Image (cartoon, coloured by chain):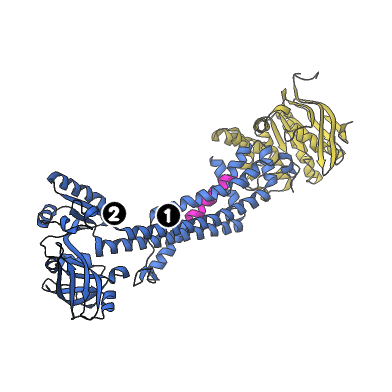
Chain colours: A yellow, B blue
């Protein structure tokens, strides 16, 4: 509780647990996580497969609700929010980068990056300016009209980074962002994330099981069997 | 909204083959409704015009009380001065012809065979030909002004009597004061109207012959024929006004109030048309629902992504319903084009030969009319059904759990 309300803390987890039912068995994915992440940090959550990394990121991203415990995003207790409020919070405060890129296949680079701004209700003119700037930031100015299936894996992940950044969120969550990329491209993507973190002071939290990747972070949390170690 | 429709439109054409199959179902359905609707509208028009031009006219004028009491007591409801009314109406717009009628029920006999008949006294003049347009003279000739003792007999009555053109027939009936009277007439022609019910009883005579038979100088009613059937609603109030202004002891009936058979046919066909529409709507409903369900199933992870970046449940619901709506609109528009082409093709190739309907003794060639109202209703139906059928898949999509949707492979 000590960190609650503390200036600069964007994510605060208090004794968070998550249980899943797998058939008749209850799986304890997270067993009492306490964590706080401050504005502008570049954080890595590391652990082997099945350790609870993705579950933790999903909870921090308000994509799922904990079984017990409290999660505060920018001093708001998100465990008491309704689905519509969570959608708006995700749209305004959190950007997501997925392992499989998760771009909308029928939209081109510009439109994929633009989409969160449409949900946000930004005017067309402002959307145009912000998308072009973001696409330039992620180095895809020449690929604006390309659809995802016309882009390489690295380019797709750059589009995803652009889509996550375009709303100027406080937090960007990246679940194994380099897992589907070759090591060279993976490092390029991490370099881009680091650059954006430094330029925009956006908090980046990414999960990985790769020790080489995790060392890119300023702060590393190791998770194992649902506990922080 | 624009972005939503654009995304929906792109998604529709993502799986071209499946969308083409859905469009095929919608186009077939639309074509079915519009072509069938055009066919029955043609049938309505044909039956309506036949009824008007062979029997009823557009408007009938009687002595007041005739329509309620005239059948039981016709002698008290005859009109004495038709000339006055004819003079009053001459020069009125939309009126093509005014003529007189005097009818009777009685017996017709060849001397060997005697049958019941319904006689109609007409004013034999050039203008009466308007009312005979839908009659076909199958033997002999139509009544001419100089054939004062002539008559035209319905084909089925003719066959039943075993008579031929040139034969003399005797008519027997009771006069308006109750005594039995008879006249002879010579068959000058045999007519067919298409209505078996009518062709098996009717005899058409000069009105003077019927007046002689009924021992009267009056007439029963006046028949007004207009240039267009649609003008009835315009002319009726004008006529009513004249009657009211002049204080005449008359009443009016439009063809529609008298055409019970026509209305029964319309009701029957409308019922059949409704069944056709329901069947087609169900086919379209399942077709679009199937497409939308498959689309939702294929795009579970995409739905998860959209939800993750902030789309609300309502946003997902609207997206998929927009896809159903657009499938309906695009399929519907293609359906309209296709049905118009098919209707043209049918009409150019000479129409569809239809065998005699019940109670008719001849078939007809049906054309397909392009009726904007039918097209509009079909389009509205298809778009509504298509949007409605996407409701359940869209609801299912909106209720997916974000995490589970994102993990979907």
Q: Position of residue A79 (x, y in %)?
A: 73, 28
Query: Label 2 to label 1, Cα distance in Å?
Result: 28 Å
Q: Earlier in the sequence, mark 2 or mark 1?
A: 2
Q: Position of residue A19 (x, y in %)?
A: 82, 36
Chain letter for the residue marked with disc 2 in the picture: B
Residue under the image location 82 percent in, 43 percent down: A22
Chain letter for the residue marked with disc 1 in the picture: B
Residue B301 seen by the camera: yes
Q: Position of residue B299 (x, y in %)?
A: 67, 48
Residue B325 is a magenta residue: yes
**Depth order, front residue of B140/B226:** B140
**Depth order, front residue of B219/A43:** B219
Provide the secondary structure element on which disc 2 rests: helix
Q: Which quarter shows the N terminus of chain B? A: top right
Checking the image for residue B257, the label placed there is 2
Residue under the image location 61 percent in, 46 percent down: B392
The quadrant in which residue A115 appears is top right
The quadrant in which residue B187 appears is bottom left
Q: Is residue B328 left or right of residue B250?
A: right
Q: Which residues are magenta?
A: B320-333
Checking the image for residue B122, the label placed there is none
């Amino acid at each position: 509780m000590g960190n609650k309300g503390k200036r600069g803390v964007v994510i605060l987890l208090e004794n968070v647990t998550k249980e899943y039912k797998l058939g008749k068995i209850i799986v304890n994915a997270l067993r009492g996580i306490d964590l706080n992440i401050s504005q502008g940090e570049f954080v890595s959550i590391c652990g082997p497969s099945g350790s609870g990394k993705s579950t933790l990121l999903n909870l921090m991203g308000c994509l799922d609700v904990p079984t017990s415990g409290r999660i505060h995003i920018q001093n708001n207790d998100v465990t008491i929010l309704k689905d519509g409020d969570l959608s708006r919070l995700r749209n305004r405060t959190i950007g997501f980068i997925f392992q499989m890129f998760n771009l909308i296949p029928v939209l081109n680079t510009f439109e994929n990056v633009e989409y969160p701004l449409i949900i946000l209700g930004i005017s067309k003119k402002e959307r145009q300016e912000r998308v072009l700037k973001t696409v330039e930031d992620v180095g895809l100015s020449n690929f604006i009209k390309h659809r995802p299936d016309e882009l390489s894996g690295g380019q797709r992940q750059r589009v995803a980074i652009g889509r996550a950044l375009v709303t100027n969120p406080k937090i960007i969550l990246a679940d194994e962002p380099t897992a589907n990329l070759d090591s060279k491209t993976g490092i390029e993507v991490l370099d881009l994330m680091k650059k954006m973190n430094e330029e925009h002071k956006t908090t980046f939290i990414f999960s990985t099981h790769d020790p080489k990747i995790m060392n890119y972070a300023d702060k590393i949390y190791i998770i194992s069997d649902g506990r922080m170690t | 909204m624009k972005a939503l429709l654009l995304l929906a439109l792109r998604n529709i054409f993502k799986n071209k083959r499946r969308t083409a199959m859905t469009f095929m179902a919608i186009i077939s359905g639309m074509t079915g409704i519009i072509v069938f609707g055009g066919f029955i509208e043609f049938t309505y028009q044909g039956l309506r015009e036949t009824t008007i031009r062979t029997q009823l006219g557009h408007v009938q004028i009687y002595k007041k009380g005739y329509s309620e009491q005239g059948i039981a007591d016709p002698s008290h409801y005859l009109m004495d001065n038709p000339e006055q009314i004819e003079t009053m109406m001459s020069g009125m717009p939309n009126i093509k012809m005014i003529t007189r009628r005097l009818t009777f029920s009685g017996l017709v006999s060849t001397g060997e065979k005697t049958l019941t008949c319904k006689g109609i006294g007409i004013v034999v003049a050039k203008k009466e030909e308007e009312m005979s347009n839908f009659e076909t003279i199958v033997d002999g000739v139509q009544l001419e002004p100089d054939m004062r003792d002539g008559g035209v007999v319905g084909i089925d009555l003719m066959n039943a009597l075993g008579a031929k053109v040139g034969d003399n027939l005797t008519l027997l009936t009771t006069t308006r004061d109750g005594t039995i009277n008879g006249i002879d007439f010579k068959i000058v022609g045999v007519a067919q109207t298409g209505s078996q019910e009518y062709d098996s009883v009717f005899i058409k005579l000069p009105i003077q012959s019927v007046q002689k038979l009924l021992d009267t100088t009056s007439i029963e009613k006046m028949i007004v024929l207009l240039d267009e059937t649609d003008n009835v609603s315009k002319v009726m109030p004008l006529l009513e006004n004249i009657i009211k202004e002049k204080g005449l002891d008359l009443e009016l009936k439009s063809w529609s109030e008298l055409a019970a058979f026509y209305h029964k046919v319309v009701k029957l066909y409308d019922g059949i048309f409704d069944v056709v529409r329901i069947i087609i709507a169900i086919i379209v409903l399942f077709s679009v629902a199937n497409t939308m369900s498959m689309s939702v199933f294929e795009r579970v992870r995409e739905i998860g992504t959209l939800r993750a970046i902030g789309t609300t449940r309502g946003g997902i619901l609207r997206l998929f319903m927009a896809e159903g709506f657009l499938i309906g609109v695009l399929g519907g528009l293609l359906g309209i084009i296709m049905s118009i082409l098919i209707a043209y093709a049918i009409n150019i190739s000479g129409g569809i030969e239809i065998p005699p309907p019940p109670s008719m003794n001849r078939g007809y060639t049906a054309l397909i009319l392009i009726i904007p109202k039918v097209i509009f209703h079909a389009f509205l139906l298809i778009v509504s059904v298509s949007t409605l059928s996407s409701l359940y898949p869209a609801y299912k999509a909106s209720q997916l759990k974000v995490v589970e949707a994102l993990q979907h492979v």
